[in-house]
Amino acid sequence: MNIKALFISALLLSGTAFAAPANKDTLFYCQFNNGKQVRIEQHGDKIRYRFGKNLARPELAFEQPKDQVFLNRLTPLLDNDRRGEIIEIHLRNGDVSYIAAATNIIRKTIYSLSARRSGTEPEMICKRRGAFINRDMALSLPDLLDN
């Protein structure tokens, strides 16, 4: 095998190793520096939320009907007359509201997860590698109404 073929093979394989672990049902996925991860998936008319180090045995898991999971999409005007995009997916479990977000400002996307409860809203920023939002699937969710 020549060097060029070996190099091309290595590039192709390394790209798959670092691809987001997503499938056609994944709405949002990311990992955090503490090793925990969150995956939000659509299964038929349900949205499933899983959080923890091992998603096969998550620390927290719940399902919501798709019509009870909401989208908040903002397109702020930036200083350079360009538009950014913020896509938030809102889920509720008991008295906690979970917000998975992708904030795109000038070709840089920041993924995050926050949990709003009793006026507090701690936020965790995702690692950039492997973070994923299925934009088309997110845009098909019902719009979040003003509170």
Image (cartoon, helix red, strand yellow):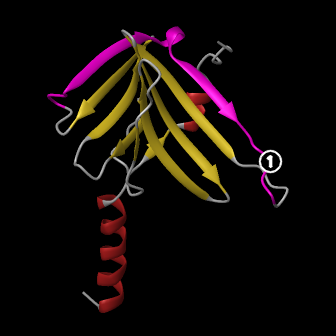
Circle 1: element type: loop
Up/down of 67 relative to 128, above or below: above
Q: Position of residue 75 (x, y in %)?
A: 74, 40
- Image-quadrant location for residue 22: top left
Q: Residue at x 42, y 37 (%)?
A: 113
The residue lying at 33 percent from left, 59 percent from top is 18
Q: Residue furthest front?
A: 119
Query: Which residue ends up furthest to the right in the rendered image?
Result: 81
- Where does the image place residue 13, in percent across and percent down from the top left? 30, 66
Q: Is residue 5 left or right of residue 66?
A: left
The magenta span reads: 56-79
Q: Residues within 10 Å of mark 1 (few under 14, many from 20)?
A: few
Taking the image as shown, residue 52 lies to the left or right of residue 32, namely: left
For residue 74: magenta? yes
Is residue 123 a member of the stretch shown in magenta? no
Circle count: 1
Q: What residue would you read off at disc 1?
A: 77
Left or right, 56 with reference to 67: left
Q: Quadrant of residue 48?
A: top left
Q: Nearer the viewer, residue 142 or 140?
A: 142
Which quadrant is the N terminus positioned in?
A: bottom left
Which residue is more in the foreground, 99 or 139?
Answer: 99
In which quarter of the view is residue 4 placed? bottom left
* Nearer-the-camera pick, 8 or 75: 75
- Return the residue nearer the eye: 33 or 70: 33
